Image (cartoon, grey):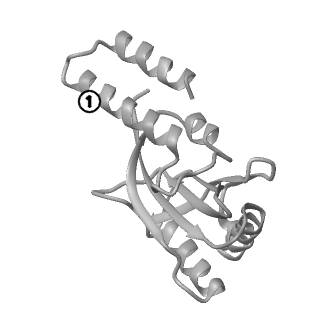
Amino acid sequence: MGTKRISFARIRVDKNQKEAFELTKKILDELNLQNWKEKTINDEKYFIFCRPKISLFKFNKVTNNFYIMVKPENNTSVIEIYYDLVTFGVYTKHVIDPFYNKLSEILASKPSIHLSVIESTTYEEIEASANEKTHSDNVSADTHSVADEIAKLAKLKSEGSLSEEEFTKMKNDLIDKM
């Protein structure tokens, strides 16, 4: 399986992890989850997996998975959204924008948000980063460094510098170090 490009948002909130997670669940409930195909909540690891239905055309339903996690950062927390839809850049319309707008409305302020496209090979890698402490340099140390290294390996593979077997072994070695 190849590398996935994922739209990513990190939102800093001035709440502890538990408060921010309860707020996250409330917002997702208000965003009409009954129209979504699947919703899995893990209260111990502070993450939610969702598979929404998205109508691109009148009769065509497309699903795109997303994870939303709340991670501790010092005395506050960050809400991270991983959304497996990327166009020519970060895609925010269906999940990130509605969530951020509702959060801003509830908080009566616009919290800091960082948007990017990240590389990931599996949903298991994303899920494995749940509940990791984040750092004020705007990255989750292990996830960011492993994702960066895997992206570099994928580039080397696409350029022909690594075989599929070499790439797979090196990628698995990196994942094992997480």
- Near-viewer residue (154 or 146): 146
For the C terminus, give its image quadrant.
Answer: top right
Residue 120 in the figure: left or right of residue 48: left
Q: Position of residue 25 (x, y in %)?
A: 73, 66
Amino acid identity at mark 1: Lys
Which residue sits at x=56%, y=51%?
65
Answer left or right for 128 relative to 34: left
Residue depicted at 60% across the width and 41% down the height: 129
Local crowd size for mark 1, using a 10 Å CA cut-off: few (<14), some (14–19), many (≥20): some
- Give how far across and how far down residue 78 sits, in percent: 59, 62
Q: Relative to 143, does residue 154 appear above or below in the rendering?
A: above
**Residue 11 at x, y percent in the picture:** 53, 66
On the question of residue 64 being in view, the answer is yes
Asked whether residue 120 is in view, the answer is: no
Residue drawn where x is 32% and y is 25% of the image: 153
Q: Is residue 41 above or below residue 128?
A: below
Name the residue nearer the viewer: 169 or 97.
169
Element carrying mark 1: helix
Q: Nearer the viewer, residue 130 or 132?
A: 132
Q: Identify the residue position indicated by label 1 in the image.
A: 155
Residue 168 locus on image (x, y percent): 42, 16
Q: Is residue 165 above or below residue 144?
A: above
Image quarter of the N terminus: top left
